[in-house]
Image (cartoon, rainbow, N blue to C red):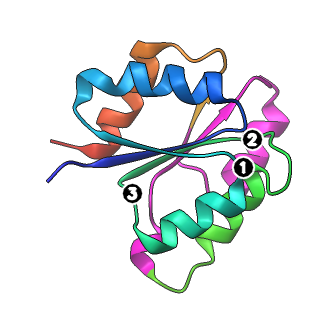
Amino acid sequence: MARTVLIVDDSPTIRGFARIFLKPLEVDVAEAEEGMQALEMVRANAPDVIVVDVNMPGMDGLAFTRELRSDPRAEIAKLPIVLLTGDRSEQVKQEGRDAGANDFLEKPIKGAELQSIVKRFLGP
């Protein structure tokens, strides 16, 4: 059974690059434009890894992470979340850790970094 990576970003370009970069891993890639849509998708069909942009209109990546971490179902609340951000400040990383993020990926996305992080969370 194929494993799924959910990419949550308001930019179709970023989602497209992520899809291309993840192709060698032979995973299914699901996409959402914003946090609320992503929450609905996760609750309906949980992915194996979530990569979510910090800065999005509506529900941003930090609010999404906090909401997911508070889900009553452990299998949802414990999903690996990687925050995607162009902001390299320690403050954003601290806010992400406080929200419950597992890791961070800097924009612009580099294929090797994305693959490495996703592989680490997918395991063998």
Q: Earlier in the sequence, mark 2 or mark 3?
A: 3
Q: Which mark is residue 54?
A: 2
Q: Could you say where residue 60 lies in the image, as x and y percent from the top left?
A: 79, 51
Q: Earlier in the sequence, mark 2 or mark 1?
A: 2
Q: Could you say where residue 2 lies in the image, as x and y percent from the top left?
A: 19, 48
Q: Is residue 96 above or below residue 73?
A: above
Left or right relative to 84: residue 78: left
Between residue 100 and residue 33, name the one nearer to us. 33
What's the CA distance linking mark 3 and mark 1? 16 Å
How packed mark 3 is, by other alpha carbons closer than 10 Å (few <14, some 14-19, many 20 or more), is many
> Dot 3 corresponds to which residue?
47
Q: Secondary structure at mark 2?
A: loop
Q: Secondary structure at mark 1?
A: helix
Q: Amino acid at mark 1?
A: Gly
Q: Could you say where residue 67 lies in the image, as x and y percent from the top left?
A: 68, 70
Q: Could you say where residue 6 lies in the image, as x and y percent from the top left?
A: 47, 47
Q: Which mark is residue 2?
A: none
Q: What residue is drawn where x is 39% and y is 57%?
A: 47
Q: Is residue 69 magenta?
A: no
Q: Amino acid at mark 2?
A: Val
In the picture, which quadrant includes the N terminus? bottom left
Q: What residue is drawn where x is 71% and y is 50%?
A: 34
Mark in front: 2 vs 3: 3
Q: Are marks 2 and 1 in contact (CB under 8 Å)?
A: yes
Q: Is residue 103 above or below residue 11?
A: below
Q: Amino acid at mark 3?
A: Pro
Q: Earlier in the sequence, mark 3 or mark 1?
A: 3
Q: What residue is drawn where x is 57% and y is 18%?
A: 109
Q: Is residue 97 above or below residue 10?
A: below
Between residue 124 and residue 37, name the one nearer to us. 37
Q: Magenta region: which residues?
A: 74-103
> Dot 1 corresponds to which residue?
61
